[in-house]
Image: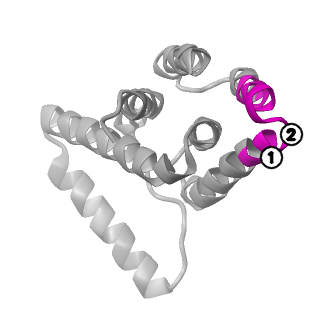
Amino acid sequence: MAALCVFLAAACGFDYKKKRIPNGLLALEALSGAAECLYGSGFPGVSVFVGKALLVTALLYPLFRIGTLGAGDVKLFGVTAGYLPFGKILTFLFFSLLTAAVISLIKMWKEKSFRGRAARLWGYGEDVIKNGRWKLYPVEEQGARVCLSGPVLISALLCWGGAY
């Protein structure tokens, strides 16, 4: 687990500085997790690790397709979920996204942009319902984005600390 914390901290550094998480870092994180599972449980453990990572990646992929999550965020969630016990994955996702939502609300409060963003979200929802299909979510400002590597790290630490 210590290796995962190092990888998540490095992901935070890249995400907050360059607004992207390098695929090489994610590959190292995945290889480290697979190696840990191979050492602890053999090849069945590796297949469980890969299965959890792919399941979470597949579940979050639609959010990437509509532009609400970045590709690096989806891969980071997936690889990190591979390290967790299966029964804690949904809680991990919930706390990660809850932390991101709180950060987003604080940013909107500081920028005094809650009404405009809420109106944009409402209009997007109405359009999806009216047309019966998903489309890219309109994001005009890059400053509106929340780097999700921090919430992923916080949620993982809460999990390992026994908070859930």
Q: Is residue 89 above or below residue 157?
A: below
Residue 94: in sight, yes or no?
yes
For marks 1 and 2, give the CA distance: 6 Å
Q: Could you say whether the residue bearing mark 1 is in a helix, strand or loop? A: helix
* Numbered circle sitting on residue 128: none
Tell me which corner region of the image, top left, top right, bottom left or bottom right, holds residue 10.
top right
Tell me which corner region of the image, top left, top right, bottom left or bottom right, holds residue 65.
bottom right
What is the x, y in percent for residue 162?
35, 33
Q: Amino acid at mark 1?
A: Ser
Q: Amino acid at mark 2?
A: Phe
Q: Is residue 46 magenta?
A: yes
Residue extent of the magenta highlight: 31-48
In the rendered image, which residue does mark 2 sit on? 43
The residue at the point 66 percent across, 49 percent down is 52
Image position of 124 (left or right of 70): left
Q: Nearer the viewer, mark 1 or mark 2?
A: 2
The residue at the point 45 percent across, 48 percent down is 93
The residue at the point 23 percent across, 58 percent down is 118
What is the x, y in percent for residue 22?
68, 23
Q: Could you say whether the residue bearing mark 2 is in a helix, strand or loop? A: helix
Q: Nearer the viewer, residue 118 or 79?
A: 79
Q: Contact, CB < 8 Å: mark 1 with mark 2?
A: yes
Q: Is residue 25 magenta?
A: no
Neighbourhood count class around disc 2 (C-alpha, 10 Å): few under 14, some 14–19, many 20 upward: some
In the rendered image, which residue does mark 1 sit on? 47
Tell me which corner region of the image, top left, top right, bottom left or bottom right, holds residue 125.
bottom left
Magenta: predominant secondary structure element? Answer: helix
